[in-house]
Amino acid sequence: MSTEGIGKTVRDVMHEGAQCVGEHESLTAAARMMRDLGVGSLPICGDDDRLKGIITDRDIVIRCCAEGKDLDRCTAGELAQGVVWTEAGSSIEEALNQMEEHQIKRLPVLESRRLVGMISEADLAKELPDGKLAEFVHRVYAHA
């Protein structure tokens, strides 16, 4: 079995410099930000610059558009999902366990209680041995 990825931390494989959408920003603004950044999710930060949750493009479609809500009036904070995150110094294995436990594919990364990046299944796919990757994908998508 390959030892690739063993000993690396979340910091080693995350995307640095994740940008937040403000909790009071409209979903129109969040969608435009996703488009401009080429991402499918954004961390939501509050006025105190702390992580309040995460919003995905799917959240916007399912929980706003499909419900007939106004994208300009509905805020990112209204759709904020529970705050699940990992520390930058955590092991890749710890991040995998959190993603599996919460059935999520993207995880905000904090250091000293501040957002420093995001880690996704694609980031992990580059680091994991094939067997571990297959196991992770099965466990996350089996309950989706």
Image (cartoon, rainbow, N blue to C red):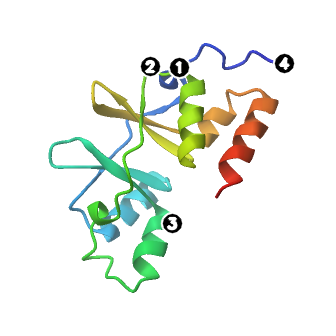
Residue for badge 2: 89
Whole-number angstrom distance, CA of label 3 to CA of label 4:
36 Å
Q: Name the residue under label 3.
A: 58
Among the two numbered marks 1 and 3 on one chain, the one whose residue lies closer to the N terminus: 1
Q: Do the residues labelled 3 and 4 touch (CB within 8 Å)?
A: no
Which residue type carries mark 1?
Thr
Q: For label 4, count other residues whose C-alpha is less than 10 Å away and answer few (under 14), some (14-19) or many (20+).
A: few
First along the sequence among labels 3 and 4: 4
Residue 23 pos. (x, y %): 24, 57
Mark 1 crowd level (few <14, some 14–19, many ≥20, 10 Å Cα): some
N-terminal-most mark, 2 or 4? 4
Percent x, y of residue 27: 33, 68
- What amino acid is at disc 2? Gly
Q: Which mark is residue 9?
A: 1
Q: Residue at x 74, y 46 (%)?
A: 138
Find disc 4 in the rendering and name its residue: 1
Query: From what the image shows, is residue 11 above or below residue 44?
Result: above
Secondary element type, mark 1: loop
- The amino acid type, in three-letter code, at marker 4 is Met
Q: Rounded to the nearest whole Å, what is the CA distance between mark 1 and mark 2?
A: 6 Å
Which image quadrant: the C terminus?
A: bottom right
SS at mark 4? Answer: loop
Mark 1 and mark 2 in contact? Answer it, CB < 8 Å.
yes
Name which residue type carries label 3.
Arg
Q: Quadrant for residue 115, please give it.
A: top left
SS for dot 3: helix
Q: Which residue is drawn at 37% across and 58% down?
A: 33
- Label located before the other in sequence (2 or 3): 3
Q: In which quarter of the image is the N terminus?
A: top right
Image location of residue 82, percent across then percent down: 38, 51
Give the CA separation, mark 2 to mark 3: 29 Å
